[in-house]
Amino acid sequence: MNTIEIRANFHQLIDQINNEQLLIKLYHIMEQAIATADGKLWSRLSDDEQIELLRIEGEVQSDQNLIANGQMLEERYKQSLKNPQEGKSWAEVKNGLLNR
């Protein structure tokens, strides 16, 4: 789809919405998206916050900081054998995920 088709389809979708609350929510989303131009958020950060984000990005992209999934699971398994009462039970974890 090109820009003209996207705009036409978008207008058609909006015209089909009869729920005023939904229209208000969509309006606010679009208004905020337009107001937040690329780079605007970055420029609102302090120098320290920008430096911290760049440092974190470097750490995330560094292969030295990666731990293989199998290695992580093995370490967690060893910890659970040492202290089986530590942490939450599987039922607690599952319920926490389901109740989000």
Image (tube, rainbow, N blue to C red):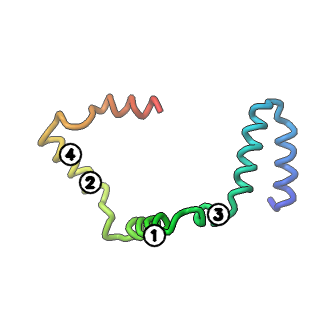
What's the distance in space between the residues labelled 4 and 1, CA to CA?
36 Å
Could you say which quadrant of the image residue 68 lies in?
Answer: bottom left
Relative side of 3 to 46, left or right? right
Could you say which quadrant of the image residue 67 lies in?
Answer: bottom left
| Relative vertical location of residue 59 with respect to residue 77 in this rendering, above or below | below
Find disc 2 in the rendering and name its residue: 72
Residue at disc 3, secondary structure = helix
What's the distance in space between the residues labelled 4 and 3, CA to CA?
44 Å
| Residue 15 point in image, percent of width and height | 87, 39
Find disc 3 in the rendering and name its residue: 40
Mark 3: which amino acid?
A: Lys
Disc number lying in front (4 or 1): 1
Pointer 2 or 3: first along the chain: 3
Residue at disc 1, secondary structure = helix
Could you say which quadrant of the image residue 62 lies in?
Answer: bottom left
Cβ atoms at labels 1 and 3 below 8 Å apart:
no
Cβ atoms at labels 2 and 3 below 8 Å apart:
no
Residue drawn where x is 16% and y is 47% of the image: 78
Find disc 1 in the rendering and name its residue: 51
What's the distance in space between the residues labelled 1 and 3, CA to CA?
16 Å
Residue at disc 4, secondary structure = helix
Mark 2: which amino acid?
A: Met
Q: Of residues 20 and 39, which is closer to you in this image?
A: 39
Residue at disc 2, secondary structure = helix
Relative side of 90 to 4, left or right? left
| Residue 34 point in image, percent of width and height | 74, 56
Mark 4: which amino acid?
A: Tyr
| Residue 50 point in image, percent of width and height | 49, 67
Find disc 4 in the rendering and name its residue: 77
What's the distance in space between the residues labelled 4 and 2, CA to CA?
9 Å
Residue drawn where x is 39% and y is 29% of the image: 95
The N terminus appears in which quarter of the rendering?
bottom right
